[in-house]
Image (cartoon, rainbow, N blue to C red):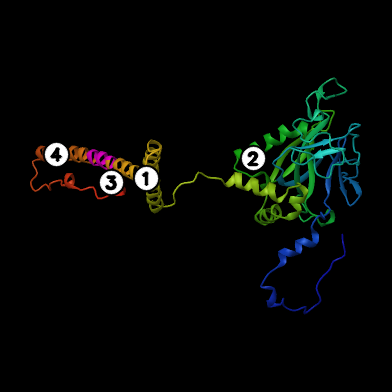
Amino acid sequence: MGTEIALPKGFGAISSVFGGNKTGVNDELGAGVNSSYGIVGIKGKVWSIRFAGEEKQLMREDGDGPRNSVEVVLLKASPSISKIFYKNGYVDGANAAPDCWSADGIKPDSSVQAKCHSTCADCPMNAWGSRVTDAGKQGKQCADSRRVAVVPSDDMDNDLFGGPMLLRIPAASLKDLKAYGDLLSSYQYPYYGAVTKIAFDPSEAFPKLVFSAIRPLNDAEAAKVLKLREDKRVATVLSETAATVAASNAATEEKKAVPSSPFEQDIQKETAKETVKETVKESVKETVKEESKGQSPEQVAADEKRKALAAKKAAAVEAAKKAAEEAARLAAAAEEDDEEGLEEDTSTGTSVESFDAMLDKLL
């Protein structure tokens, strides 16, 4: 643990010149410097924690050998499958950095010195069959895993190892992790709402993980977990960037756009009318323009006036036709219901004052 630092007693208030709370700018001091975090590792079927350059094996409380399981809270999981590649193969329990790796499974991390390929999808090391196991089974040279931020269930602050820790779920256990999540979902539990026991499958020679729920979190623990999920240290553990988080939130929160009120719908209708009117106007102008090539300005003006008048007349005829149909409908209804005092429909007498007014009536 690092040396604790604090401001002197009676340090005083911030100057009003700074315009209020400016603590966000302090992130500039830590730009490019990641806080150290613990890594929950697996050596064969032995759990270990690596932190600050040191490694500690997790042993049974009775001292009788290494423990077979750990009890943790799964704080948050990376939405992407990460990839790790060792040129000479991975040596069980080795601490050496991989030759190439990707946190998002899309492209190698920017810190990789010798990238195998510019993208993971087309990388030959990521192709099925690029590796053959000792048992003769096909696999991939570049191993898949999912990054998960965890804390010990009995010490969620985990100050000794820097708070949230990284646990890489190996490819052989990804389906079991999904099945565990589906099980919790069926009981309406979020995966971070329970203490999870992670053990080794005794029927497998390699370290395949088995997940089981021990108990639900109490209210105090749940409040702490929700706070930890938003902790910057979790984002560091999962190698999330601001752009990745923003894109994920946008995809999660995207909804179909609908008017929030009838007023917005009216505005949309009026906008549509104006658009149609402008389209009709432009169509008339373009028609006149095309037909008047080589004509004098006077002839062009006369043609434009004639076209506009023709359009007005056509609109007026259509309006009159619709008005007559409506009048006939009302007359039939009046005769059928034998109602007196039915007002006469006078819409047939409406005059066409302008081209715009006629388009408004039609729309």
Query: Can you say whether 260 is above or below 103 in the image?
Result: below
The answer to which image quadrant residue 198 occupies is top right
3 or 2: tag closer to the N-terminus: 2
Task: Name the residue tied to disc 2.
Answer: 184
* Residue range of the region highlighted in magenta in the rendering: 310-318
Report the amino acid beneath label 1: Pro
Of the residues tagged 3 and 4, which is closer to the observer? Answer: 3
3 or 4: tag closer to the N-terminus: 4
Q: Residues within 10 Å of mark 4 (few under 14, many from 20)?
A: few
Tell me where residue 235 appears, x and y as whole percent: 74, 50
Query: Can you say whether 2 is above or below 120 in the image?
Result: below
Near-viewer residue (272 or 117): 272
- In the rendered image, residue 313 lying in the magenta stretch gets the answer yes
Label ID, residue 297: 1
2 or 1: tag closer to the N-terminus: 2
Asked whether disc 3 touches disc 1, contact meaning CB atoms under 8 Å apart, the reply is no
Report the amino acid beneath label 4: Ala
Task: Name the residue tied to disc 3.
Answer: 358
Near-viewer residue (113 or 71): 113
Near-viewer residue (297 or 60): 297
Q: Residue at (31%, 48%) from the top-left corner?
A: 356
Q: Residues within 10 Å of mark 3 (few under 14, many from 20)?
A: many
Q: CA distance from mark 3 to mark 4?
A: 28 Å
Tell me where residue 298 appears, x and y as whole percent: 33, 45
Give the structural element (helix, strand or loop) at label 4: helix
Q: The N terminus is located in which quarter? A: bottom right
Label ID, residue 333: 4
Residue at the limit of the structure toward the top, as seen here? 136
